[in-house]
Image (cartoon, rainbow, N blue to C red):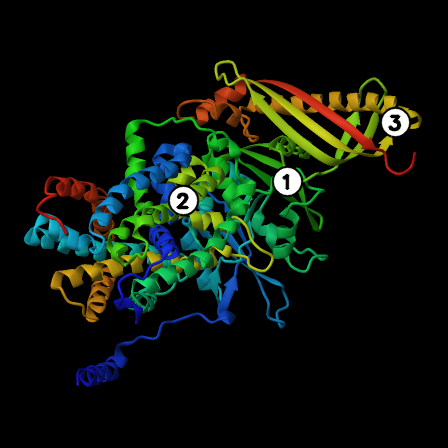
Amino acid sequence: MNKKILLFTTLIGLTFLVGCSRAEHKVPLEEIGLAGIMAFDYIDENKVQLSVAIPQHSPGAKASTQVFSVPTELLSKGIVDIEALSDKKILFNQLRVVLINEEFARKGRVERMIQHLYRNPEPGNKVLIAIVKGSSEELINADYPNKPDINYYINDLLLPTINTAFNPNTNIHDFIYTATNPVFDPLLPIIEKKDDKLEITGVALFKNNNMFETLTPEEAFIIQDLIGKKKLAPLSVELNQGHGKESLMLERVKSRVKMKSNKNIKSPKLTISLFYKGTLVEYTGERENDLHSPESLSKLEKDINKQVEEEVKKTLNKLKELKVDPIGLSENFRMYYDGKWTKEMTEENISKLEVDIQVKTSIISTGTLD
Amino acid sequence: MSTHTKKILNGYHVVFLAQSAMIGSGILTLPRELSSVGYSQTFLPILFGVFASLTLWPMVWLNLKYPNENLFRINEILLGKGLGKILNVLIILQFTLFIAGIINKYMHLIQSTALPEQTITKPVLLFLLLLIYIVNGGIKSIARFCMLTFFLTIGIFYFTYWAVQKGDFSHLFPLFNFNGKELFEAMGKGYLAVLGYGAIMFYFPYIVDQKKAFKHVLTGIWISISLCFITVLISVMYFSEWQLKHIEFSILNLLKSGELSFVERFDIIGVTLWVFLILTTVAVYLWSAKEGIVSLFSKEKKYYIYVLTAIVFLIVRIPFPQEFQDKFFTTVNYIAYFLIVWPSFLSIIYLLRKKQVQP
């Protein structure tokens, strides 16, 4: 009996309540535009030119990418404006690259923009960030005759490869991590358009949330080496140790970095030891014909050690002068410091830091020819 | 059905009931709750484990004195019928609100990640229907579901290895650079994540081997504690102190840190799989609350569960202002601590009134 009443009331309820349900508007897949690149250009203190590149998958489309661009104050407001221009709903689940032009990086509120993306659950953490020399809007609008799609082109360019080992490959998480961690300063790769191709020409150093200085690829390479990147790029060395000008290439098999601090922040001292183990691939110079004996090779190893030491020292001195710490050298002091570590302490620490560098190279072979 | 024969839970059931009731929504935000002590939070889960083990002892001790009664009945025996019943009503109320709090928190996460453009009414309804189904099966069915859940979800932890690769081991170096107030704050907020083992006081009468129950629950507790420890450890390695403080769901970001060749956004899978962990926790609490009502009216009716679930649904769906909601659920959570120390208090009463309250 009870069950019958229950069934009856449910049925009546359902019949009359059907009109109350409202169809939820869901966007079908064809009407979604998945943004691949987002770019910021500096206009003035408050305003930024926001550009979004959306790859087009329709076979009828002539251009492979559609680019929208609006000036805006708020990032999310800009996205709404762009949606109004576009025929599609724009989602950021497939966002791959964020480009920031140099002026914005130097004067704009970079951290706020990146934080907005970090807060948004839509984009993944693997969105890569890069600085553009000149206008980033022009860069994505430009024509690259050899490349089918700018979205994939820039993403592939920024992904880690052996040949651009100096590239810090900074993604959103890395940027936020290094910007908010007092012992780090963020690094971002700089890309530049040269003729009809793009090139990573250097690395931008950040300090207090703004771009501050550029580093050459060679300096950036040393920094990546000291950070201890696992990827083993070939080491090219220009020797200048009393045998005239020599140059050589060392294909590394193993490389390790070890840091030891004296735990004293009053007079900080850091011992950095670098170990390289590799094959001598190519050599040109005075000693070309007498590199057959183990003795001559060990002499060469010593010369390489000296040369690398000098170069590392030079880079570190530059960082010391600039009072920035992209490597996180201060972490070796923070981990022993009983108290709260601040950004100012990192600055002070790096400017006072005394570094002792020891490089140890070991050439394990010279190829299959004797 | 097997629900009416009393002793039905074997050792494995007990281990996983204890374990699953602990891992729920708390662990999702654990690194943030502990963030007032910064990087030093790594060791806190271990401390929680020791605390949990210590507070478990009076619970089991008391239950062993009354092997056929649950906490609701023990309250009535030790405090007298009137006072005991009032207290039981409060416990039932607290459980109901606690369940609503857990569901609310999880649905908030789901809304902001997996279903950004929908209201959560339908997901909550489906969740509650599933919950009723599980709880209707009785404590043994919940225990079996807990075991299933553990093995279904434990795999998620493997996918934190991306974060380990990127993390800095030097963050783990113990500095103890915090003061007492910060430690107290972290303990107060973080201990919530490991509550849940207290439910032993309600399903104890159903355990076959009650002598070994302490050992079994302890195993469960330490499985959960090690999961919490791993989560906190990896978060400390992967995040900066600022991130630890500001990222709401650290597990979500840990899972975001990498990708498989065929799955790009593993975090969404992880978060949706998490529903199992929430279900087990909530199921144990709901079952306990139902037992409470049974002891209150001294008879068993099927509709108790439906009524409780309906109340939970209303609390989750009533549009309270967000601020009030946060305060409300936080207060409810703190009351949960009361249940942890209550058995110790009851044990003292038992010792004082030993002669009068022999079972």
Crowd band around label 3 with a 10 angstrom C-alpha radius: few (<14), some (14–19), many (20+):
few
Instruction: Give how far across and how far down residue A316 sits, in percent.
Output: 62, 23
Same subunit, labels 3 and 2: the answer reads no
Q: Secondary structure at mark 3?
A: loop
Q: Residue at x 30, y 55 (%)?
A: B102
For the residue marked with disc 2, what is the amino acid? Cys
The reply, left or right, for residue B197 in relation to residue B234 is left
The residue at which mark 2 appears reads as B228
Marks 3/2: CA distance? 59 Å
The reply, left or right, for residue A131 in relation to residue A180 is right
The residue at which mark 3 appears reads as A285
The residue at which mark 1 appears reads as A167
Of residues A245 and B218, the one drawn nearer to the viewer in this rendering: B218
With respect to residue B209, does B138 lie above or below? below
Whether residue B248 is visible, yes or no, is: no
For the residue marked with disc 1, what is the amino acid? Asn
Q: Secondary structure at mark 1?
A: loop
In which chain is the residue bearing label 1?
A
Crowd band around label 1 with a 10 angstrom C-alpha radius: few (<14), some (14–19), many (20+):
many
Q: Secondary structure at mark 2?
A: helix
